Image (tube, rainbow, N blue to C red):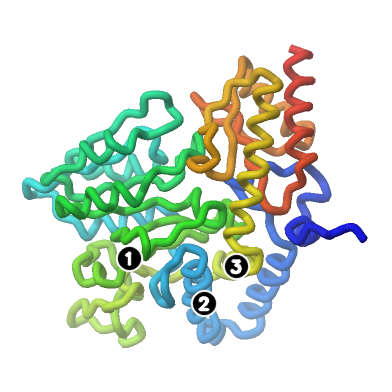
Amino acid sequence: MKTVDPLLARRGEFPILRDCTYLISNSLGAMPGRTRDRLNEYADDWATQGVVAWEKWLPLVGQLGDLVAKIIGAGPNEVFMIQNVSIAESILISALDFSGKRNKIVYDDLNFPTIHYNWLAQESRGARVHLVRSADGIHVDTQAMCDAIDEQTLVVPISHVIFRSAYIQDAKAIVEKAHRVGAMVFLDIFQSVASVPVDVHALNVDAAVGGLLKWGCGGPGNCFLYVRPDMIPKLVPRMVGWFSHKRPFDFDMSGLDMRDDIWRYAGGTPNVPAVYAGLSGAEIINEVGIENIRKRHIEFTTFAIERAQEEGLKINSPLDSKVRGGHVTVDFPCSKEACDELIRRKFIVDYRPGSGIRIAPHFYNERDEVDAVFSEIRKIIARR
């Protein structure tokens, strides 16, 4: 009897896989079929219960945060859902003072732009941004990062997995150096969540931001913020809202009695529809298991690199699977136009300027789909 692959047995849970070759889960994960039911449930709650539905909605925010916590190695009540990473990073930044000598911000030039823009905006408040340059646009030199972190460094806001190349940074070494000189690390784990094992407790990061939008199959609006529990009293945000208060429904105007837990970073009203959408993805990732996902990603990205080499394409991702995340970036003349053509042919990938086409198979993809996209690239190049 033929053995059924337990990961591929779940393909039927993702409707888009019936209509196209979907290989871009590092940008937007495929929607689980059960998410439609969850969103219908949200609509029914609103339609039939009105404002009373908040009694159900608010606990769901914490429930989803706890599902994310299991994926990233955090504990219960340590993760809060935020609409996007820009807001999450801004909340962390609002807790900082750049007026002293310790005002240096260190990160690399392969960081995601939204993180970069958030920190550049702090230069008017006294922050000094120090960019560590990548020599090849793929890797970040860990020693160069550590050398740049000194006693004047306030925080190191880096990506665990680089969005362009899928390079996995040595976050542990960087955290250890930062803490040795009294600096903090805010780790962006967006490209790690549900792809690469990450343990925020073991890494001892001061805070982490990320989301379920990509490998987590949770849809837009499902980002999150983790702050190490012992850092919560020290990171006092200035970007707050009524849910940051211990008793938001007291509508107290006498002062800000800020919460002592992760909800102090909540700010305003949570994004309830996004929470409903995110529950299914987070459940599925926990059911499948990050170790199983990582094993499949290594298998398929290794095969993708072999196929790219056969086709003579430039590979802008690490060749070593130990430092490669879940996708492979390939480049060649007219790759942007080729990407557009692939999408027209129902091969869903994406393109990043200066890097090329990103190909990101997930646990629900088949090996033949990876092979097929490279065969299609060969046909497109031949026509041109």
Label 2 to label 1: alpha-carbon separation? 17 Å
Asked whether the viewer can see residue 355, the reply is yes
**Residue hosting label 3:** 286
Task: Check disc 2 and report its element: helix, strand or loop.
Answer: helix
Q: Which comes before the other along the chain, label 3 or label 1?
A: 1
10 Å crowding of disc 1: few (<14), some (14-19), many (20+): many
Which part of the image, by quadrant, shows the C terminus? top right
Q: CA distance from mark 2 to mark 3?
A: 13 Å
* Residue 228 point in image, percent of width and height: 31, 67
Q: Amino acid at mark 3?
A: Asn
Q: Which residue is mark 2?
A: 63
Residue under pointer 1: 227
Q: Position of residue 68 (x, y in %)?
A: 50, 67
Q: In screen coordinates, is 266 left or right of 285?
A: left
**Circle nearer the N terminus (2, 3):** 2
Q: Residue at x 37, y 45 (%)?
A: 170
User: Residue, x 27% and y 78% (percent of image)?
Assistant: 260
- Lower position in the chain sequence, tag 2 or tag 1: 2
User: For the residue marked with disc 1, what is the amino acid?
Assistant: Val
* 85 to the left or right of 213: left
Q: Secondary structure at mark 1?
A: strand
Q: What's under tag 2, amino acid-wise?
A: Gln
**Mark in the foreground, 2 or 3:** 3
Give whichever of 181, 17 is nearer the camera: 181
Q: Quick one: SS at disc 3?
A: helix
